[in-house]
Image: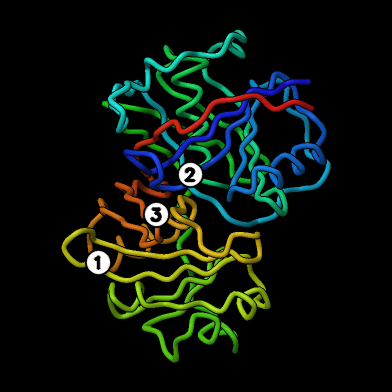
Amino acid sequence: MKLTIYQVDAFADKVFKGNPAAVIPLEDWIDDNLMQQIAMENNLSETVFFVKDGAARPPQTPPKEGLSKTQPMLSQEAKNDKGTSQSEVSAPDTPPLGGRGAYHIRWFTPDYEIDLCGHATLAAAYIIKNFLEPHVAEITFSTQKAGVLKASAKDGLYTLDFPSRMPEVCEVPDKLLASLGITNAVEVLRSRDYFVVLPNEEAVRNVEPDFMIMKELDTIGVIVTAKGHEAADVVSRCFYPGAGIPEDPVTGSAHCNIVPYWSEKLGKTKLACQQLSARGGDLQCELVSDRVLMSGKCVLFMQGEIFL
């Protein structure tokens, strides 16, 4: 068996930035254990698989309520750093998976399947729009636990439509602040992940996490965030050692928490967000009712085949 694989840098306008995701289109679902083995072999924060709606079957094991990252779609003519238009990259010889832009999507970290992922959804939409169904106006993704997700694109910018998840005040676990190497925080909340508000952007940059301690917490991840300086309204960093990802470069799903929280604090619905990882990433976000719209660019890094 041969599978086509793509690697896409999501929330980036050039390679080696943003968050890399492996994207594997399927005509029919393959065994869950095999998908997990492929994700382990790829050793990226996320490997995403999708099939045309109608071919999907329930997973053998329900996805964990874990990490996530974001979703849009494209007609992008943006040039990469070698001057090549993304639309000029040769398409695979295999025929498109079908029409109408409706897919069932699943995400795997190197350790297990998760419930929602933003950057890998963005990467999947990029591949569908550029290689499989360039004429669809909107892509819809059905999921096991996150409802229906949508992706669209305009002028090379992909926009994901994700659920808003306002974090709520919680008891502060004894080891949470120690796992971040800090002694106090402005506020500690929780949604899926712990959500730690720090006094300023510099404090976010200076966090030195202890991942051994963090793994002992009763959640997959920890988000640290603060009001930004001039470059962005909001900054963040995201840690998911429980999912095999010490620091995630750009985390779409975290912005399901970040956007409603800071929209309320700052009194604005449109936010420029920046993730302060080593690779870095920029997201243009908007809170619309109970949904978070996240926009960013994608760049194709690699296309190849898996031999099984």
Measure the alpha-carbon separation of dots 2 and 1: 21 Å
Residue type pointed to by label 3: Arg
Residue at 65% from the left image edge and 50% from the top image edge: 109
Residue at 63% from the left image edge and 29% from the top image edge: 24
| Dot 2 crowding, Cα within 10 Å, few <14, some 14–19, many 20+ | many
Give the residue furthest to the left: 230
Q: Is residue 90 left or right of residue 242?
A: left
Q: For mark 2, give the secondary structure.
A: helix
Residue type pointed to by label 2: His
Tell which circle, 2 or 1, labels the residue nearer the N-terminal end.
2
Quadrant of the snapshot with the C terminus = top right
Residue type pointed to by label 1: Gly
For marks 2 and 3, give the one nearer the viewer. Answer: 3
For residue 92, which numbered disc appears in the image? none
Q: For mark 3, give the secondary structure.
A: loop
Which residue is label 1 attached to? 228
Q: Position of residue 129 (x, y in %)?
A: 45, 21
For residue 279, which numbered disc appears in the image? 3
Q: Position of residue 17 (x, y in %)?
A: 38, 47
Q: Is residue 76 left or right of residue 43?
A: left
The residue nearer to you, when weighing 8 against 153, is 8
Measure the alpha-carbon separation of dots 3 and 1: 18 Å
Which residue is label 2 attached to? 119
| Dot 1 crowding, Cα within 10 Å, few <14, some 14–19, many 20+ | some
Residue at 32% from the left image edge and 64% from the top image edge: 235
